[in-house]
Image (cartoon, rainbow, N blue to C red):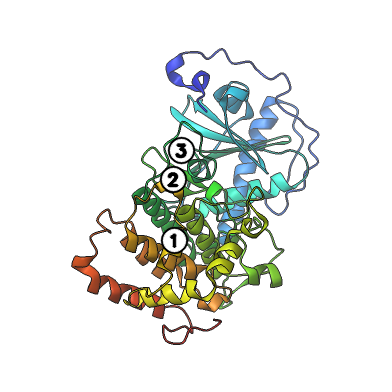
Amino acid sequence: MNCYSCSPADGNYSFQRNANLYNNNDGDKCAPFVKIVSCKTDLCIEKFRKQQKRNIEAEILKVGEAKNTCIVFTYQELVAATNNFNPMCLVGEGGFGRVYKGYIDSIDQVVAVKQLDRNGNQGSREFFAEVLMLSLVQHQNLVNLIGYCVEGEQRILVYEYMPNGSLENHFLDLLPDKEPLDWTTRMKIAAGAVKGLEYLHDVADPPVIFRDFKASNILLDSEFNPKLSDFGLAKLGPTGGKDHVSTRVMGTYGYCAPEYVKTGQLTKMSDVYSFGVMFLELITGRSAIDQSRATEEQNLIRWVCSTHKISFLINFYLLIAGKAIVKGQEKFTLMADPLLEGKYPLKGLFQALAVAAMCIQEEANMRPIIGDVVTALEYLAKPDIDIVEKSAKEASIKNYRFVNSVKGGSVNGIRGL
C-alpha cells in the first residue's frame, strides 16, 4: 500500500494533532525493564523520556554490549510522521499491532512505525524484548531498529522501511497484478534469511534463538534482500554450557519444532526446523497451514511426509551423497510451486528439497547445524546453479560433507526411517 501523504515529496505537513497526546492512566507493568511514571507537564515528559532511555540502556548493559544506539522519539513526532496514524499509511497488521509508513523530518528518513496494541501487557512485553534484542545485534540480514517511543500507554517502535514488504506477500498472499518470485530470487531470499539466523546463533553475544521464524517475519528491501524482523518472541541463550532454554511454548502453529512443543525446551535446532518449514513453503508455494485445502493437505509437513513417505528422505540423502535418484523423481517435480511454471534447475530443486527435508527431521539431533545450511543455500543461490555438470563432483563433495555434519547421522545409516 502506498502512503503518499507521508512522503516528504508531497510537501503536505498539515498533520492533525492529537489533543490527547499523553495518556497518564497507564496500567502496564513492564518490569524489569522500565518503571512507568505518570507525567503531567511537558517538562516532566522530557525528564521521563531521558530516564526511560537510561533505564533501558542499563538493562541492555546487564545482558551484553549494545550494537545500536536508538533514538527516543516523542509521540507527537510519530503522530506527525504518520499523519496521525492515517489508515492510508497502514502497510501491515499483526497480532501485536499495526505498522505504518511514515517520514520523520528530524532524521530525513522514510520509516516503518509499529504501534503496539495497548490492550493488556503482551504489547509491552514484546516492545521491551524487541528493543533489547535489536540493541544487542547488528547484521545486514536483520532489520534495523531506529528508535522507539514510550509515553503513557503508547509503545511504538520505529524501523527502517522495507519497500517490498514481507516475503509472505510475494508467494503466499500474491495479488493478481503481482509477478511471482522466480527461482533464483527465492534461493537468494532463503540464503540471506538463514545468514541472519546464523548470526543470531553463532556470532551474537549472548546468542539469540529467534523462535518465530516464518515468511511474514522476513522483510524485503528494494532489491529483495531479506531481513529478519519481529523479535518480540526471541530468547537470549542458551549460555553457561546449556543446550536449551526452558520457556513457555510460543510461536506460530505449523512452524514450531515438535520437541519444543512437547517439552518447552527451546534450542537453536528449533530455529533450524522453522527455517525448513519456511523453505518448503518457498519451494512449493504452499502455506505451512492452509485450511482451504483438502484435509490431508492442510498441514504442509504432514502432506510432504505422508505423500512421499520414506522415499522422500532416502532419495534425497542418496542425491546429496552424489548418487542419482532411481525412482519417484516425478513426485518431487510435482512439489514445485506451479507459479514457477517449470522454470527452475531440476537438480537445484532436488537439492533444495534435500536441505528442507533434513531441517524438518523430527529428531533435533538429526538436523544440520545452521552454518552448514548457510553453505548449502549459498551454493543454491548461485545464478548458474543449473550448469551442474561442470562442477558435479565438487558439488557432491560439498553436499556429502553437509550430510555428515548432522549430529549422529550418516548417509548409510539413516536413523528414524
Of badges 2 and 3, nearer the viewer stands 2
Amino acid at circle 3: Met
Q: Residues within 10 Å of mark 2 (few under 14, many from 20)?
A: some
Q: On the image, numbered disc 3 is attached to which residue?
A: 162
> Residue 339 has which mark?
2
Amino acid at circle 2: Leu
Residue 216 image offset from top left, x and y in percent: 55, 47
Can residue 57 be seen here? The reply is no
Left or right side of 60 for 226? left
> Residue 199 has which mark?
1
Can residue 280 be seen here? The reply is yes
Q: Which one is nearer the viewer's eye here, 207 or 72? A: 207
Left or right side of 216 for 178? left
Count of residue discs: 3
Label 3 element class: loop
Left or right side of 47 for 319? left
Residue 340 image offset from top left, x and y in percent: 40, 48
Task: Say if 401 sits above or below 88 in the image.
Answer: below
Label 1 element class: helix
Pick whichever of labels 3 and 1 is earlier in the sequence.
3
Residue 4 image offset from top left, x and y in percent: 49, 20
Of badges 1 and 2, nearer the viewer stands 2
Q: Quadrant of residue 237?
A: bottom right
